[in-house]
């Protein structure tokens, strides 16, 4: 059984963590898995223990300390099932981010408190706008020298045009960063223990009380624009209750016109649990985000898909992965349900496919399940399809809109080092182009060379390296 069969739909969150390279996304995911008891020890991205972060499971990712593929995992937090997709921050892996965002309901945009909004933060933000994804911004690395969350907040407003407001306030900064004040309930939180797992709640320190009140006032005014209850109380000068305030922030966030901003340090284990709480309070459940299918029997008329398990099944294959056991297809179920052994139809080519095995992924580990329902993110085995294909139960013929694929920006001529590797070389390129639409391969008519094109040098370099490692075939570029 998928976890969410036990959990009601309003307690499911499908979220992604996106950011500029080195803002600390994967470190944040690692903390999330630790506090939700999904892993029992914390491993750093480039740690001394040589284990590498859980979400970076390709050898290449661990060596380079970057995230290449979107790893999917799920965890439980205070009765909520959170499906978490860790996305790459390098612009070379943009398609991974596009695919992840396509199937998410909400997201966390991570900024570095020293650098603020960077080039890839702008790209990721543009992608989130394209898919209308409500988001929370987490200003990370508060422990670093030069940390300044207020500059980050200003950049969010000026560079990204966000109506962004702090919902928690830092206690100290740099090496004096101690914890956070929740501006909703006006309580201070400190994170004790080796890994910040013991949360201590206290009164707001007197020396920052004035600032906290100022930012809280701004927050109430901003939320009042979206929520009548808060708006009225603001005008009458009465205090909203914590529940009313949270409901107001949720309404404002889901309207896409407001972005809550939080502060913390994932590496120093401060503020992550408050972020998890905010994900459950303010980001949408699968029934709250509008997903549209196109009815192929009715001239591509738009149909709103409902997260109802009783309706006909609709699912989108958003990522393919050649695992050790054959092709793994990541799928988001948008409507209805799919069971192990069901026959489903691929809308792209009308092929019938039997579902031999259904699993939930935790990075590269699998947990077998019997059925998946609307709102679930699961993986299927042995289903032949391309990334972006829509599956139905055959009673309807819907497709989801296809994902936007950017044009290639760089090309290289590539060949196997010796002739014996030719078969493996072709096999590798075949597989990689199927799983990554931004990687393109063609033969140059004049020179007879094989040309690969992609999103940047690093993108192509990683694929050359993967041909060598996974197919034992050295390449010359």
Image (tube, rainbow, N blue to C red):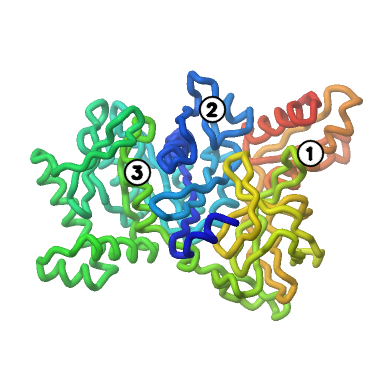
Q: Earlier in the sequence, mark 1 or mark 3?
A: 3
Tag in front: 2 or 1? 2
Q: Is residue 102 visible?
A: no
Residue 429 disc label: 1
Between the residue at mark 1 and the residue at mark 3, the CA separation in whole angstroms equals: 42 Å
Q: Label 2, on which residue?
A: 52
Q: Residue furthest top?
A: 48
* Earlier-in-chain disc, 3 versus 2: 2
Instruction: Please determine whether, in this image, residue 370 is positioned above or below residue 264.
Output: below
As measured in the structure, the alpha-carbon distance from the residue carrying label 2 to the one carrying label 1 is 27 Å
Element at label 2: loop
Compared with 135, 344 (above or below) is: below
Q: Is residue 220 left or right of residue 310?
A: left
Q: Are marks 3 and 2 in contact (CB under 8 Å)?
A: no
Q: Which mark is residue 273?
A: 3
Residue 191 visible to the viewer? yes
């Amino acid at each position: 059984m998928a976890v969410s069969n036990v959990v009601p739909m309003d307690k499911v969150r499908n979220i992604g963590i996106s950011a500029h390279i080195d803002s600390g996304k994967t470190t944040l995911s690692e903390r999330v898995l630790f506090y939700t008891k999904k892993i029992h020890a914390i491993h750093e991205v480039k740690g001394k223990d040589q284990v590498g972060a859980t979400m970076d499971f390709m050898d290449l990712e661990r060596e380079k300390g970057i995230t290449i593929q979107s790893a999917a995992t799920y965890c439980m937090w205070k009765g909520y099932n959170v499906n978490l997709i860790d996305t790459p921050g390098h612009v070379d892996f943009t398609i991974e981010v596009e695919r992840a965002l396509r199937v998410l309901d909400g997201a966390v945009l991570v900024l570095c408190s020293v650098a603020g909004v960077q080039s890839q933060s702008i790209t990721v933000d543009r992608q989130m706008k394209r898919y209308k994804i409500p988001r929370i911004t987490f200003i990370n690395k508060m422990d670093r020298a030069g940390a300044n969350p207020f500059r980050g907040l200003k950049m969010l407003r000026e560079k990204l045009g966000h109506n962004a407001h702090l919902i928690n306030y830092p206690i100290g900064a740099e090496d004096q960063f101690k914890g956070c004040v929740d501006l909703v309930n006006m309580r201070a939180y400190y994170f004790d223990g080796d890994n910040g797992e013991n949360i201590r709640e206290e009164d707001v320190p007197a020396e920052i009380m004035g600032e906290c009140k100022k930012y809280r006032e701004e927050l109430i005014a901003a939320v009042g624009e979206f929520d009548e209850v808060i708006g009225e109380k603001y005008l009458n000068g009465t205090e909203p209750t914590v529940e009313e305030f949270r409901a107001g922030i949720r309404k404002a966030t889901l309207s896409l016109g407001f972005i809550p901003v939080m502060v913390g340090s994932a590496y120093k284990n401060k503020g992550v649990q408050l972020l998890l709480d905010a994900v459950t309070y303010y980001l949408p459940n699968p029934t709250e985000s509008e997903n549209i299918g196109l009815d192929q029997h009715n001239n591509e008329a738009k149909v709103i898909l409902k997260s109802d398990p009783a309706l006909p099944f609709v699912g989108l294959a958003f990522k393919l992965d050649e695992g050790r056991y054959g092709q793994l297809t990541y799928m988001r179920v948008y409507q209805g349900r799919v069971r192990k052994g069901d026959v489903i139809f691929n809308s792209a080519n009308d092929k019938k496919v039997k579902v031999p095995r259904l699993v939930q992924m935790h990075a590269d580990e699998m947990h077998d399940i019997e059925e998946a329902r609307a709102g679930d993110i699961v993986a299927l085995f042995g289903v032949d399809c391309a990334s972006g294909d829509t599956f139905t139960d055959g009673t309807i013929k819907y497709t989801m809109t296809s994902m936007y694929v950017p044009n290639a920006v760089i090309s290289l001529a590539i060949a196997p080092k010796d002739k014996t590797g030719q078969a493996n070389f072709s096999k590798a390129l075949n597989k990689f182009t199927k799983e990554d639409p931004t990687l393109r391969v063609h033969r140059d008519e004049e020179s007879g060379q094989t040309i690969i094109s992609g999103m940047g040098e690093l993108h192509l370099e990683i694929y050359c390296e993967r041909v060598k490692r996974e197919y034992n075939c050295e390449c010359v570029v």
